[in-house]
Amino acid sequence: MKYIYESLFRAVGFCFSAALLVLSLLCSIKLAAVNDTAARLEKEVNALQEENARLRAACETSLSLEEIERYAREELGMQRCMPGQILYLPYPAEG
């Protein structure tokens, strides 16, 4: 009888150890997949930050006030207003 209990204990211990080993391997695989995803996303974030910086620089250098004024005068036929044409509206009082 003692032999049966000892064999049963060894079998249960072996199954428990095997289950822990399988769970450990599955967790290790999942962790590697998460690390790969994190590395890919980090590269994507860096690429998007570089593109954002490049686009900001292009936007800042693409339009200047001189170009806008030239376009308004030459293309739209606009002109600067005379001092008598400016009307200042009073700021409403608080309270």
Image (spheres, helix red, strand yellow):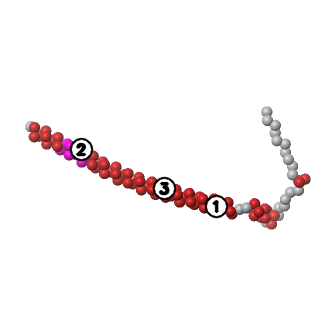
When the figure is inspected, residue 70 is found, relative to residue 2, above or below; the finding is below
The crowding category of the residue bearing disc 1, from other C-alpha atoms within 10 Å (few below 14, some 14 to 19, many at least 20), is few
Residue mark closest to the camera, 2 vs 1: 1
- CB-based contact (under 8 Å), mark 2 and mark 1: no
User: Which residue is disc 1 drawn over?
Assistant: 57
When the figure is inspected, residue 88 is found, relative to residue 71, above or below; the finding is above
Q: Position of residue 94 (x, y in %)?
A: 79, 35
The numbered mark, 3 or 2, whose residue comes first in the sequence reads 2
The three-letter code of the residue at mark 2 reads Phe
Q: Which mark is residue 42?
A: 3
Residue at 53%, 60% (x, y): give it. 47
User: Which residue is disc 2 drawn over?
Assistant: 16
Q: Which mark is residue 40?
A: none
Magenta part of the chain: 11-18
Instruction: Decide whether residue 12 is among the magenta residues.
Output: yes
Magenta portion: prevailing SS class: helix
Residue mark closest to the camera, 3 vs 2: 3
Residue at 78%, 64% (x, y): give it. 70
